[in-house]
Image (tube, rainbow, N blue to C red):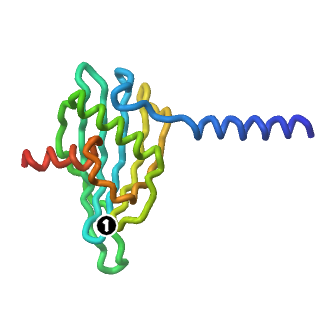
Amino acid sequence: MGSITFTLTLLCFVSHALAAEKAATFSELPKGDELHVVFTTSGCFHFATYELTFRRQAEPTLKVEEFRYERSKKSQSITATNRFTLGELNLTKADLEGLDRLLEFYRSNPGLGCTTVDRISVSQRHNGKVAVTEQFVDGSCSYDRKDLTRFTELIARFRKKE
C-alpha cells in the first residue's frame, strides 16, 4: 500500500511540475526552437483562426497561415476547409519585446467580459517535438494597451501587402 501512495504522490508532483512549465519568451527563444501559436478570435461579427510560427534563426522570423472556413447550411456548423499562407516576415527587437509583454499579459489571466474572445495556444518545439504547451483565453477587451505587440497587428502587416 505504501508504494501505491508514493507512486500517486510522485505522479501528482510530476503533473503539477509539468503544468507549471512555461514556453520560452519570444526574445529568449533558443536558436533552432519554434513557438507555434494557434490564435482564434471570435466576436459578434467575426471568427478567424491563424497559425503563427515564430523561429529563432539568424533573424527572428514569423510565418502566418490563415484557416478558411465555410458554414454548413444543414448542420449550422463552421468547418475549416483550407489553409492559406499569408507570408513570412522578419521581426524587430521591438516586436519581440512587445510579444514578450503580450505573453506576460496572457499569463496574468486577463479575464472575460467582452464579446470578442481570443483563444491562444502556444507550443514550444525543440528538435521538432513539442516541449511545452500553454493555453490562454482573453476576453478582456484591453485593446488599448500600446505596449503590446498583438498577433492581430502582425497579421495586419500581411494585409497591407495585399
* SS class, disc 1: loop
Q: Mark 1 = which residue?
A: 43
In the depicted structure, whether residue 22 falls above or below residue 93: below
Question: Local crowd at mark 1 within 10 Å, few (<14), some, or many (≥20)?
Answer: few
* Rendered residue at 27%/63% (across/down): 69
* Rendered residue at 28%/59% (across/down): 48
Outermost residue, right side: 1
Residue 159 in picture, x, y percent from top left: 12, 50
Residue 107 in picture, x, y percent from top left: 46, 44
Quadrant location, the N terminus: top right
Residue 2 in picture, x, y percent from top left: 91, 36
* Rendered residue at 25%/35% (across/down): 62
In the depicted structure, whether residue 145 falls above or below residue 41: above
Outermost residue, bottom side: 74
Left or right, 123 with respect to 49, comes to right
Residue 25 in picture, x, y percent from top left: 39, 31
Q: Place residue 53 in its image quadrant.
A: top left
Q: Nearer the viewer, residue 25 or 124?
A: 25
Q: Amino acid at mark 1?
A: Gly
* Rendered residue at 35%/23% (across/down): 32
